[in-house]
């Protein structure tokens, strides 16, 4: 995989940072894209730090332009991990909150995938891995916008997989359950305990446990897997 360039969105922390580290360990040249930037991590893994807002079309263009300028070859692996939440009941939801979540969690994945496919089609090789959520499969009260965006990612994944399969490009989705990230760290302990009770394995997952299947799906070993939705949730979806 040393001749491949991987671009990871939302790479400054949590799952995105874990994925970036694992891809670098596999020998890939990694582009870390985030709003805040991740210069320390980029230096540590000898990657490229790109500060860009991929909820905007110009942010996607800037990220890919920087990657191609730095490495001189197209992006071969795309991991769409960027995501935000604006939780609240639908009756109280503002249009701007809905728009922000859909732009960051779903529309950005469409734009990054569209841009990445230009190079992947020419190379006749590519891997797109979308980071969804178990919420996109089960729903969750108070997360209408987030669940809708992640459910949309499932449809995007399956449809795009069919469009590009003949070009040796795979498109898959990893759907994490409760994971120890900054998003779950702010939950009150009683809510965390309710979450743990729902999980057959009795604990939250780690970012590294999400990164491992992502890296597998980005590898040559996953060449015959496309359009799949993999729940990585400690058994939550079956409980």
Image (tube, helix red, strand yellow):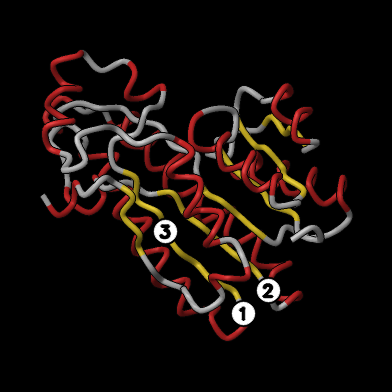
Where does residue 119 sit, x and y in percent of width and height?
73, 67
Which of the 4 image quadrants contains residue 190?
A: top left
Q: Which residue is drawn at 41% across and 72% down?
A: 159
Q: Quadrant of the N terminus?
A: bottom right
Vertical relation: 165 (above or below) 27: below
User: Which mark is first along the chain, 1 or 3?
Assistant: 1
How far, Cα to Cα, is label 3 from label 2?
Answer: 18 Å
Q: Do the residues labelled 2 and 1 touch (CB within 8 Å)?
A: yes
Q: Where is residue 41 in the image (x, y as percent from the top left)?
A: 69, 27
Image location of residue 160, percent across then percent down: 47, 71
Work out whether residue 29 or residue 155 is closer to the camera in this orientation and state it: 29
Does the residue at mark 3 contact the one at mark 1 (Cβ under 8 Å)? no
Distance between the alpha carbons at the discs numbered 3 and 1 = 17 Å
Eyeballing the image, is 71 above or below 168?
Answer: above
Q: Which callout, 2 or 1, points at the residue further toward the start of the chain?
A: 2
Of residues 198 and 39, the one drawn nearer to the viewer in this rendering: 198
Q: Which residue is at 43% across, 49% downward?
A: 131
Q: How crowded is mark 2: few (under 14 residues within 10 Å), some or many (20 or more)?
A: many
Which residue is the site of mark 2?
A: 125
The disc at residue 168 is 1
Q: Say what secondary structure mark 2 lies in.
A: loop
Residue displayed at 70% across by 62% down: 76
Q: Residue 173 carries which label?
A: 3
Residue at point 65%, 37% (across, down): 33
Which of the pair 222/111 is nearer the observer? Answer: 222
In this picture, residue 61 sits left or right of residue 43: left
């Amino acid at each position: 995989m040393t001749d491949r360039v991987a671009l990871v969105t939302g790479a400054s922390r949590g799952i995105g940072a874990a994925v970036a580290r694992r891809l670098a360990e596999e020998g890939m040249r990694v582009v870390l894209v985030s709003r805040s930037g991740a210069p320390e991590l980029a230096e540590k893994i000898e990657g490229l730090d790109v500060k860009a807002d991929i909820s905007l079309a110009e942010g996607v263009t800037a990220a890919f332009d920087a990657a191609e300028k730095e490495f001189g070859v197209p992006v071969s692996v795309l991991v769409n991990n960027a995501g935000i939440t604006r939780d609240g009941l639908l009756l109280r939801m503002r249009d701007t909150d809905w728009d922000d979540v859909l732009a960051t969690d779903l529309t950005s994945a469409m734009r990054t995938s569209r841009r990445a496919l230009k190079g992947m089609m020419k190379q006749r090789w590519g891997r797109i891995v979308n980071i969804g959520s178990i919420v996109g499969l089960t729903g969750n009260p108070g997360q209408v916008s987030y669940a809708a965006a992640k459910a949309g990612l499932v449809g995007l994944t399956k449809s795009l997989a069919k469009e590009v399969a003949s070009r040796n490009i795979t498109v898959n989705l990893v759907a994490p359950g409760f994971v120890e990230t900054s998003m779950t760290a702010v939950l009150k302990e009683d809510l965390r305990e309710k979450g743990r009770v729902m999980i057959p394995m009795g604990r939250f997952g780690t970012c590294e446990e999400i990164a491992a299947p992502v890296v597998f799906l980005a590898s040559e070993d996953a060449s015959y897997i496309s359009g799949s939705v993999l729940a990585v949730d400690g058994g939550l979806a079956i409980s």
